[in-house]
Amino acid sequence: MIKFIAAALWIVAVTLGAVFYSFQAAANLPAADDKKPLLGGLDYVKTDVISVPLLKGERVEGYFLTRLVYTVEPKQVAKMSVPMDALLVDQVYSYLYGNPQIDFTQYDKLDLDAFRNGLRDSINARIGEKLVHEVMVEQIDFLTPDDVRDNAVRRRSAAATAAAKSAEAEAAGEAPAAAH
């Protein structure tokens, strides 16, 4: 019986010690607001594909296509009266048209870091606060008008070929294959 009481007292003492230690450790943790930007506390806003026609004079030189990811403070985004997507797309257009020295036709001279940092700084300057912490590029492409025309011709010819095969199958009495 004495062994049973001693074991119960030992369990109570260990449990109290563990609870006391956990409260002390929790009191010494940094606040949630002290997190570093890439370690948490930020939202990631992913854009759809943004297509910007690049003009020189009255001629379209090509189309800049990009998909970007922005890291933003959730508290700042909640205060905005304009949808975040609309602001981001507008700033991409404004930044590209406001910086004609950016030449996407010469890939070797494209400074991607300068593009990302310039875009981030232009958004923050427009808002008047540090809203965007980092801009990350998920996709970036440049298509010339010839590339766009070639892609359209290929799509049309592929659709015509598929329609011809479907018509042949129907004429032969077969059920057309389901398109996936």
Image (tube, rainbow, N blue to C red):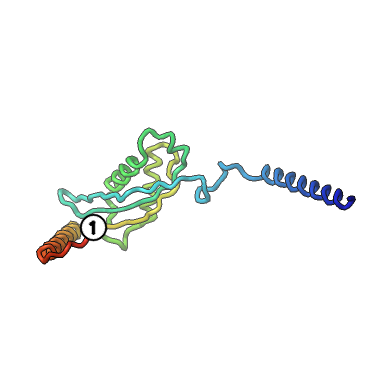
Q: Which residue is mark 1?
A: 143
Q: Is residue 95 visible?
A: yes
Instruction: Give the image quarter of residue 83.
Output: top left
Write the residue at 51% across / 45% down. 41
Q: Nearer the viewer, residue 149 or 135?
A: 149
Q: Is residue 133 left or right of residue 103?
A: right
Q: Residue at x 47, y 37 (%)?
A: 75
Give the side of residue 69 with respect to residue 98, left or right. Answer: right
Question: Total number of numbered labels?
Answer: 1
What residue sits 79% from the left and 46% below the top?
Answer: 12
What residue sits 37% from the left and 43% below the top?
122
Could you say where residue 49 lies in the image, as x and y percent from the top left? Answer: 30, 51
Say whether residue 157 is visible: no
* Quadrant in the picture for the C terminus: bottom left
Depth order, front residue of 168/157: 168
- Residue 66, position in %: x, y? 31, 53
Query: Toward the viewer: 177 or 143?
Result: 177
Say what secondary structure mark 1 lies in: strand
Residue 3, position as x, y percentages in the image = 87, 53
